[in-house]
Image: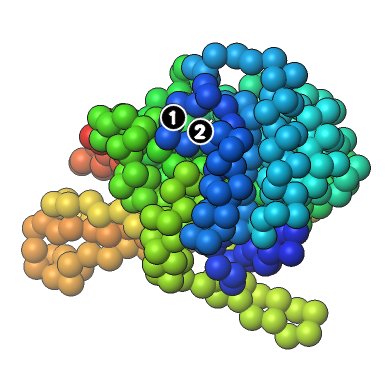
Amino acid sequence: MTVDVDICGLKVGDEHPVHLMGVINLSHESFYKGSVVGTDLLLDVAHRMVDEGATILDVGGRSTWPLASPITKEEERERLLPALDLLRDNVDAVISVDTMFADIAQASLEKGAHIINDVSGFAVDPGMIDVVADHCCPAVVMASDNVPGDPIGMDAIMRSLASIIERSEARGIGADRLILDPAIGKWVQAKDPIHDLEIFDQFERLKVFERPLLAAVSRKSCIGAILDKPPDQRLYGSLAATAIVVQKGAHIIRTHDVAHTVDVVEMAAAIRSRQPITRDGDLEVSILDIIHPDDTAIAMCAIGGTSAGAGIMKNKSIGRIIRVRNVTTTEALILKQEMLARGGDAALERDAVSHETDHTDVILLGTLLQIHRLTHKLEGQARNLPRIAVMIRDVLDQDSDVEYRHMRQT
């Protein structure tokens, strides 16, 4: 489950340096006024970002901030295309264009742009996927179903990206040309900061897609909500979030603040551990870094397994270690016996085995499937075992409940 691709001459992947994508914002409607660049300063800003460490420049003529005043496609075109004329052959960087519209993407590519960054994930303009396929250009696709960023929660984001990948592959867009963006930020009204915290916390789940991963963290609303600060005071919060997503697998960081981000990215990338993998001729063995059973199903389907089979097997793939405190020795021995009967195991105090102590703690070891089957068995037993079954289910529910896991921060 490693990524190693060439994006317009840039080596992108797990074994390569993390790339910085500098934001060149031509839209006065942007949520962060400090990022807006006038035409007279465009080349100066572009050169400065490249000198500071950006290898990609993302140029946008329309603010994708949901609260921005709307503009026409013609206004977007009039801002964007002259800027591309200025940048073409004058900046040593890969040029990305932030647009949702196929005709503007087409014109931008003809003006020398290299990458299309579509925050709608090909949802807004059905012709966009054809432009990307026909030009054989890389594309950043953000998790979206109907409008930009509408999937709420990490599970929905994973489903959305899986769908985008499936549609892209059907159109001939290969793994080496699709860059995935999980849609950090308040893209729709129903999305709360807690959902972005879940993305940061579970960013490594995206690695199962085996595609380059982009994180657009810079000065986003969730940072403002946590710190209670406006966009121009969110730099340090952005850097903290950036360090986390890089450590968890991001390959490209989109940022307004290239100079401040360089050292953070380099340090976080150094902390990120390598995936265990070995090759011998045409054989390869690796350890999959999977933390959620649904992601196991994605991996199984990716190698040709059926969705039905993956659904049956996925809960066998994720293990949990659960501690149960202060149970009676008899209850502890029953817990161990029942876990062993399901292929798991349990550890308890040595003296409990010989009944030399009345109470003990128990550590249960098993897959989610084994533990769920254990709780069903305990429901019909005596003593406190039914209560213990309910409590085990409670902690498993908390483990998958984003509000429980992150509510204290918000």
Is the Cβ of the residue at disc 2 closer than 8 Å to that at disc 1?
yes
Quadrant including the N terminus: bottom right
> In the image shown, does 203 or 50 lie closer to the viewer?
50
Left or right: 333 as drawn, with respect to 31: left
Residue that extends furthest to the front in the rendered view of this protein:
40
Q: Nearer the viewer, residue 336 or 117?
A: 117
The spot of residue 19 in percent (x, y) is 56, 59
**Residue ID at (66%, 75%):** 285
Q: Amino acid at mark 1?
A: Lys
Pointer 1: what residue?
33
For the point 59% across and 70% down, the residue is: 16
Q: Quadrant of the C terminus?
A: top left
Q: Secondary structure at mark 2?
A: loop
Q: Name the residue: 17% across, 52% down.
A: 325
CA–CA distance in space, label 2 to label 1: 6 Å
Q: Position of residue 64 (x, y in %)?
A: 57, 26
Q: Amino acid at mark 2?
A: Val
User: Label 2 crowding class (10 Å Cα cut-off): few <14, some 14-19, many 20+?
Assistant: some
Single out the residue that lies furthest toward the bottom: 280
The answer to whether 90 appears left or right of 69 in the picture is: right
Q: Provide the residue designation for mark 2.
A: 36
